[in-house]
Image: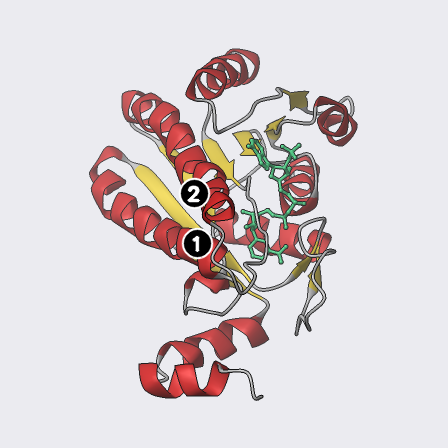
């Protein structure tokens, strides 16, 4: 698919993967609008080439107003990339507040965006929704109880929608990155194998969108590792990941 001239809304683009992807899409000739909460950071990403529309995706009213503003500014929305996300490592005590924050941003926030996008795309009988999940959604990992659960739910949600929306001419793509150097990962003190730059992630996702790949997983080493992890029996998985005392 030709990306030049496509009207693309990237949500969660004030930093990291969303910002790098927005820049990459712009470079490939797309008309891009970017959203996130931090208006200053967003304006810096947007420069003079993109439209910046600040919005908190946990608030459905803000999402509605932002979708209307983006559609008015770009003349419609062909592709929406939902990249906004939240991650905090779960400590040894189960933190319900942290769990609910993950749900609010990663799941309810994504649902708020979908609630605005699906009727619009159904009306135009065309469109593409690209959800940024994670390989962390493939298997349960200690410390990732909240984040991983929301990422697994996103994978399932996006797959259901891919089937449901096919007759309406709407493509749904699931992106599962491995580790990427962003504000989200700079707090991590554990090893992050095969980590890639946000720019590499942006290029991989833009290529996947152009190819209409149902699932975009990168880098290939992490893709292979997590595909193997998926077939490890449950008992063996828990024994292998239990910390040695
Ligand atoms: N980095 C990785 O290793 C990695 C790996 C796999 C998947 N991912 C996923 O990739 C996506 C992007 O993460 P990143 O690594 O690029 O992290 P990041 O640099 O922290 O970017 C997160 C983006 O989400 C926005 N955001 C957060 N809460 C929001 C809200 N309530 N409303 C609107 N926007 C909100 C942030 O902007 P504001 O703070 O300005 O709102 C920011 O633009 C996430 O879904 C993440 O789970 C990341």
Up the image or down, 92 lies above or below 64; here it is below
Up the image or down, 29 lies above or below 182; here it is above
Q: Circle 1 — which element? A: helix
Ligand 1 closer than 8 Å to the CB at disc 1? yes
As rendered, which of 106 and 170 lies closer to the eye? Answer: 106
Is residue 242 in view? yes
Is residue 213 in view? no
Q: Which label sits on residue 151? A: 1
Q: Which label sits on residue 103? A: 2
Up the image or down, 200 lies above or below 58; here it is below
Residue 201, horizontal then vertical, whole percent: 64, 55
Q: Do the numbered discs 1 and 2 sit on residues whose CB atoms are within 8 Å? A: no
> Which residue sits furthest front?
93
Residue 189, horizontal then vertical, whole percent: 72, 66
Residue 230, horizontal then vertical, whole percent: 38, 76
Instruction: Say few, some or many: other residues with alpha carbon within 10 Å of mark 2 (under 14 / 14 to 19 / 20 or more).
Output: many
- Residue at horizontal 51 percent and vertical 60 percent from the top: 93
As rendered, which of 125 and 55 lies closer to the eye? Answer: 55
Q: Name the N-terminal-most of marks 1 and 2.
A: 2
Along the horizontal axis of the image, is 132 left or right of 182?
left
Q: Count the marks: how many?
A: 2
């Amino acid at each position: 698919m030709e990306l030049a001239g496509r009207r693309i809304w990237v949500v969660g683009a004030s930093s990291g993967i969303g910002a790098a992807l927005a820049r990459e899409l712009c470079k490939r000739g797309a008309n891009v609008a970017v959203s996130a909460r931090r208006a200053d950071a967003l304006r810096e990403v947007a420069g003079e080439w993109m439209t910046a529309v600040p919005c908190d995706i946990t608030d459905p009213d803000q999402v509605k107003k932002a979708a209307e503003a983006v559609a008015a500014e770009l003349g419609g929305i062909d592709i929406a990339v939902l990249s906004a996300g939240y991650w905090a490592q779960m400590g040894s005590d189960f933190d319900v507040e942290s769990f609910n924050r993950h749900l609010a941003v990663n799941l309810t926030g994504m649902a708020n965006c979908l609630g605005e996008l699906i009727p619009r795309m159904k009306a135009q009988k065309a469109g593409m929704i690209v959800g940024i999940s994670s390989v962390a959604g493939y298997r349960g990992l200690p410390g990732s109880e909240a984040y991983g659960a929301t990422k697994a739910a996103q994978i399932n949600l996006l797959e259901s929608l891919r089937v449901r929306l096919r007759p309406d001419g709407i493509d749904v793509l699931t992106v599962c990155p491995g580790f990427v150097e962003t504000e989200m990962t700079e707090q991590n003190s554990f090893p992050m194998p095969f980590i890639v730059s946000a720019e590499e992630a942006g290029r991989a996702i833009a290529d996947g969108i152009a190819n209409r790949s149902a699932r975009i997983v990168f880098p290939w080493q992490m893709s292979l590792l997590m595909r193997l992890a998926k077939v490890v029996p449950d008992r063996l998985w828990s024994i292998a990941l239990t910390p040695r005392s």
